[in-house]
Image (cartoon, rainbow, N blue to C red):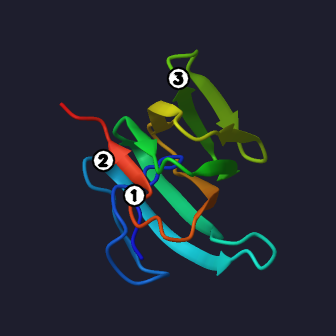
Amino acid sequence: MKYCLPPLLLAAALATPALADEVPGAKNAKITLVYEHALPDVPDKSIRGVLVEYGPGGYSPAHTHAKSAIIYATVLEGAVKSQINGGPVRTFKAGESFTELPGDHHGVSANASDTQPSKLLAVFVVNTDEKVLTIPDQK
C-alpha cells in the first residue's frame, strides 16, 4: 500500500508495499511502506512502518490521520519540524521521537533544513481495516 505521511503524511493507501513515491500536495517528499503486520494478540489491529524522506526544503501539507491511528515517529537523519494540535512548532533531530494520538491535527511536517535531507520512521498502530491513513486538510 502507498501512504502519504509527514512526519507522517499519508494521503491514501493506493499501491504496493515497499513502493516509494511522491507525496501528493507535498514538496520534495516521498514515503515508503517498510512493513505491515497484524498484531497477533490484539484482534483487528496492525502495525505499519512508514519511512518519510524529505529533501532540502521538503514538506507535507497539514493533515489528520485515520481515526484509530496512534503514531510514534523517530527522526533517523537530519531534523524535522512538527506541529501538533496548534501547539508550538518543534524541531526534532536525529534520534528524537514524537507521538500523535487518534484525532490529532498535524499542522506542520517539514524538513528543518533547506540544504540537507531528513528522514523519519513513522510507526502506526491502526485498525487493520483502515485503508486511508492520512486525510489532508480541506482547502
Where is mark 3, residue-wise?
85
Asked which quadrant contains residue 20, the reply is bottom left
Q: Residues within 10 Å of mark 3 (few under 14, many from 20)?
A: few
What amino acid is labelled 2 in the image? Ala
Q: Earlier in the sequence, mark 1 or mark 2?
A: 1
**What residue is at 30 percent from the left and 47 percent from the top?**
26
Disc 1 element: loop
Label at residue 46: none
Q: Residue furthest front?
A: 43
Residue 25 lies, in percent from the top left, at 25, 47
What amino acid is labelled 3 in the image? Asn
Relative to the observer, which residue lies in front, 50 or 55? Answer: 50
Tell me if residue 128 comes above or below residue 137 in the rendering.
below
Label at residue 26: 2
Residue 60 lies, in percent from the top left, at 38, 43
Q: CA distance from mark 1 to mark 2?
A: 9 Å
**What residue is at 61 percent from the left and 77 percent from the top?**
36
**What residue is at 48 percent from the left and 33 percent from the top?**
106
